[in-house]
Image (tube, rainbow, N blue to C red):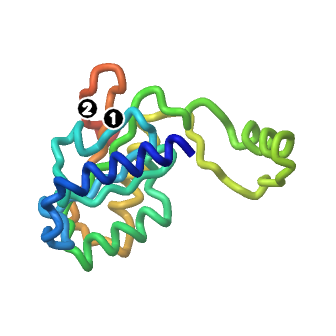
Amino acid sequence: MAERDALKAANEAYADDFSKGDLPMPPGRRLAVVTCMDARLDPAKCLGLDIGDAHVIRNAGGLVTDDAVRSLVISHWLLGTQEVLVVAHTDCGMLTFSNDDLHAKLREEAGADASDVDFKPFPNLEDSVRESVRTLRESPLLPDSLDVSGWIYDVKSGRINEVAENS
């Protein structure tokens, strides 16, 4: 509860100085970013984005899932996005477990059977980024003209590096 109160107070301070209420709905830089939910990665700060510049889609691993594609279809066709960056990061937790590990943990600690759930862990960061980029480029719901690239953010240095398409 104390954290909730601190967040509410921080929002009050933010709202007191808020001056961006008239921004248009489409992203100003015609950009979308698919990235990980990791708290060490702040896509706005590391990419120099301001409020209203880009759509940001976050999930565990920064994966282009069916739901990410759904969001990007809306972003492109209805709101004019022309470029997508897929941004993963070093030291990703998705590299540290298997589906079997998490299924067992949920069974033992929560009494839940999640054996039919693919939590989408991956063994190689670069390959995961390449697969997400490929998924977008091959989607029949997105145009070939959509500029898609893959990147890895280094949590130690704060730098991003582009992932080569084939290695």
Q: Could you say whether the residue bearing mark 2 is in a helix, strand or loop? A: strand
The mark nearer the N terminus, 1 or 2, is: 1
Circle 1/circle 2 CB separation < 8 Å: yes
Residue type, mark 1 in image = Ile
Q: CA distance from mark 1 to mark 2?
A: 5 Å
In which image quadrant can residue 145 be found? Answer: bottom left
Does 48 sit above or below residue 136? above
**Quarter of the figure with residue 30:** bottom left
Q: Residue furthest top?
A: 156
> Residue 47, relative to residue 29: is it above or below?
above
Instruction: Specify the quadrant that holds the C terminus.
Output: top left
Residue at the spot x=42%, y=71% of the render? Answer: 70
Relative vertical location of residue 117 with respect to residue 129 in this rendering, above or below? below
* Closer to us: 101 or 52: 52
Q: Which mark is residue 86?
A: none
> Can you identify the residue that label 2 sits on?
161
Q: Residue furthest bottom?
A: 78
Looking at this view, is 129 or 48 the one in front? 48
Give the number of marks: 2
Up-down: is 160 above or below 19? above
The residue that label 1 is drawn on is: 152
Q: Residues within 10 Å of mark 2 (few under 14, many from 20)?
A: few
Q: Residue at x 29, y 70 (%)?
A: 75
* Percent x, y of residue 61: 48, 44
- Residue 45 % position (x, y): 23, 39
Amino acid identity at mark 2: Asn
- Is residue 23 found left or right of 144 in the rendered image? left
Residue drawn at x 32%, y 55% is 56
Dot 1, crowdedness within 10 Å: few (<14), some or many (≥20)?
some
Q: Secondary structure at mark 1?
A: strand
Q: Residue at x 22, y 58 (%)?
A: 54
